[in-house]
Image: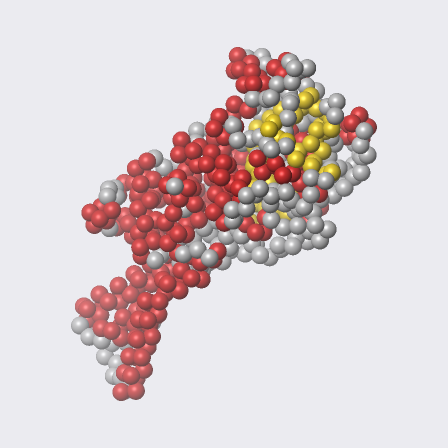
């Protein structure tokens, strides 16, 4: 529910709100399993949608899809509405479904160059040496004007690098053939996990996540993440890519009266569990900086200690559901969670955390100029959408009716590194063939370029000679212009230069800053 510039979270002695102008100062929802995290997430997502703020949420168990259908008036939620003195009015919300595997929603893709070497190295589980080689591969692609869109491109490039490892080492530093081999093997593993479907065109245009419906409600974008869970590295890499992409693409806006987009990361621990320090640092940086782009990030995880302290410190709006405190580790987590709140003299925070009922939480949000409110024991409001998943046929119906239908569903395969390298190889083969046979050099080369065969011993009329010379000139110009042209049409998809798109890779760029 939205009142003016705030979302009703629930009631303590008084109503507790999330303030929209401060909603880009991020948030955290934590609590043991079954304590009400997803329901709290849904309450916030519905509130943002009502306020015209689009939302992106990873749906781990599929239960968030319920927002697309009106609530069914189940007793706990009707009762909760009564308890906190609000009306229970079932409602449905505009939803767009996404799926990396393209089954339960629009397919989400990123290009290899958008991923950049840092994230790709993480996705492929590479060590530092191998990551170094990957960096060199991106540099070479950049210098040679080779677009890296899909895995085919990367594979072709690695092949080239492997074949020329010795020469490349002289000018780029150590390019061990062995490392190239490892990267190639890891690419195969990724393919076997169907991870390659995620890399290629048409890549996601982040503007498509920032839509409102006809009534001005924010669209709730739901990423099917149940299958993704079996590949945590893909999940983490994808979400990091998405955040860094938003960071790169959105303009600086300062403080707005409400966010432009809000992100919910469920199972946030997967982002950080055995992530290398470089990646954690990158997340910390993106979270810190993305705020001024009008994007709010909310992490959902069982335990606040799953989130690194540097990130935790930036999550201003907190909903803490019950935690258990049996083991020493759990007790430490409760203590940590309790200490992060602005204390309320009327509440023993630590004790309260272990006593909270389902759908009840300790809540503290940013208010005024950005100070945290005193922590309050709060009964969380009921969602007005359905709680729990919608059925498969309803989901299919919504997917059919999606405003983005057709845009992402077919893969396209534009001219990129693989195709360009294949052409060069063909041309080289034709050249050497021509050199061997000793005649017709240029003409053969042109024939080679077009993939046609030029029959030896054929006599040409003057007219044919002229025609072929003209063709040669045109072809040479075409080759020269090819890279630049591709840079404009593909690399420049979002107004960026080919160099930027390829070399930096978004997080890589952030890290260098
Ligand atoms: N605000 C609420 N009002 C009434 N009942 C609630 C509320 N929040 C949660 N519940 C009840 O608790 C159940 C579990 O909530 P939820 O699915 O949000 O837990 P969770 O913390 O996300 O669990 P998990 O860790 O397993 O994902 C709900 O199905 C509902 O019955
Ligand atoms: Mg849940």
Instruction: Pick out the residue farthest to the bottom.
Output: 462
**Of residues 459 and 253, which is closer to you in this image?**
253
Toward which corner of the image does residue 361 lie, by quadrant?
top right
What colouring style does the render use?
Answer: secondary structure
Toward which corner of the image does residue 56 lie, by quadrant?
top right
**Of residues 149 and 195, which is closer to you in this image?**
149
Name which residue lies at 76% across and 41% down.
Answer: 91
Instruction: Pick out the residue farthest to the front.
Output: 369
**Of residues 376 and 76, which is closer to you in this image?**
376
Q: Residue 381: x, y in percent?
A: 73, 30
Quadrant, the C terminus: top left
Q: How many marks?
A: 0
Q: Residue 310: x, y in percent?
A: 47, 28
Quadrant, the N terminus: top right
Depicted 98 relative to depicted 304: above or below? below
**In this rendering, position of residue 434 left or right of residue 327:** left
Q: Residue 54: x, y in percent?
A: 63, 45
**In this rendering, position of residue 214 left or right of residue 350:** right
Depicted 233 relative to depicted 112: above or below? above
Q: Is residue 101 visible?
A: no
Q: Residue 23: x, y in percent?
A: 61, 37
Toward which corner of the image does residue 407 lie, by quadrant?
bottom right
Depicted 367 relative to depicted 208: above or below? above
**Of residues 127 and 94, which is closer to you in this image?**
94
Q: Is residue 262 visible?
A: yes
Name which residue lies at 30% across and 75% down.
Answer: 472
Name which residue lies at 41% across and 52% down.
Answer: 501
Name which residue lies at 67% across and 40% down.
Answer: 48
Depicted 415 relative to depicted 219: above or below? below
């Amino acid at each position: 529910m939205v009142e003016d510039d705030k979302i009703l979270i629930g009631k303590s002695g008084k109503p507790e709100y999330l303030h929209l102008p401060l909603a880009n100062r991020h948030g955290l929802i934590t609590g043991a399993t079954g304590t009400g995290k997803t329901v709290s997430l849904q309450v916030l997502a519905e509130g943002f949608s009502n306020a015209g703020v689009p939302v992106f949420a990873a749906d781990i168990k599929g239960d968030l899809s319920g927002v697309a259908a009106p609530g069914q008036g189940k007793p706990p939620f009707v009762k909760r509405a009564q308890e906190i003195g609000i009306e229970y009015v079932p409602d449905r919300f505009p939803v767009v479904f996404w799926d990396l595997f393209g089954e339960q929603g629009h397919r989400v893709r990123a290009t290899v160059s958008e991923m950049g070497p840092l994230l790709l190295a993480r996705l492929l589980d590479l060590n530092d040496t191998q990551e170094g080689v990957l960096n060199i591969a991106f540099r070479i692609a950049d210098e040679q004007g080779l677009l890296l869109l899909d895995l085919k491109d990367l594979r072709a490039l690695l092949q080239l690098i492997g074949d020329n490892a010795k020469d490349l080492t002289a000018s780029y530093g150590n390019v061990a053939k062995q490392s190239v081999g490892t990267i190639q093997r890891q690419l195969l593993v990724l393919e076997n996990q169907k991870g390659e479907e995620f890399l290629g065109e048409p890549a996601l245009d982040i503007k498509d996540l920032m839509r409102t419906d006809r009534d001005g409600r924010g669209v709730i974008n739901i990423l099917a993440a149940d299958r993704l869970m079996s590949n945590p590295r893909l999940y983490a890499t994808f979400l990091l890519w998405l955040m860094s992409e938003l960071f790169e693409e959105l303009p600086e806006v300062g403080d707005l009266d409400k966010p432009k987009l809000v992100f919910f990361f469920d199972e946030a621990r997967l982002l950080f569990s055995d992530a290398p320090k470089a990646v954690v640092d990158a997340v910390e940086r993106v979270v810190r900086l993305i705020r001024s782009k009008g994007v709010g990030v909310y992490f959902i995880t069982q335990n606040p200690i799953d989130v690194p302290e540097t990130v935790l410190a930036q999550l201003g709006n907190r909903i803490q559901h019950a935690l258990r405190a049996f083991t020493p580790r759990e007790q430490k987590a409760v203590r940590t969670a309790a200490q992060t709140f602005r204390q309320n003299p009327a509440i023993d925070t630590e004790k309260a955390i272990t006593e909270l009922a389902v759908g009840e939480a300790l809540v503290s949000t940013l208010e005024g100029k950005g100070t945290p409110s005193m922590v309050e024991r709060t009964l969380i409001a009921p969602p007005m959408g359905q709680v729990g998943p919608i059925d498969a046929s309803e989901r299919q119906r919504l997917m059919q009716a999606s405003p983005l239908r057709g845009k992402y569903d077919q893969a396209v395969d534009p001219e990129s590194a693989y195709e360009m390298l294949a052409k060069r190889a063909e041309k080289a083969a034709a050249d050497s063939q021509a050199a061997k046979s000793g005649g017709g050099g240029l003409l053969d080369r042109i024939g080679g370029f077009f993939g046609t065969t030029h029959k030896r011993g054929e006599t040409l009329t003057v007219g044919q000679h002229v025609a072929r010379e003209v063709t040669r000139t045109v072809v040479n110009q075409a080759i020269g212009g090819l890279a630049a042209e591709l840079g404009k049409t593909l690399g420049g998809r979002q107004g960026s230069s080919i160099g930027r798109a390829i070399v930096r890779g978004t997080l890589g760029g952030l890290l260098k800053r």
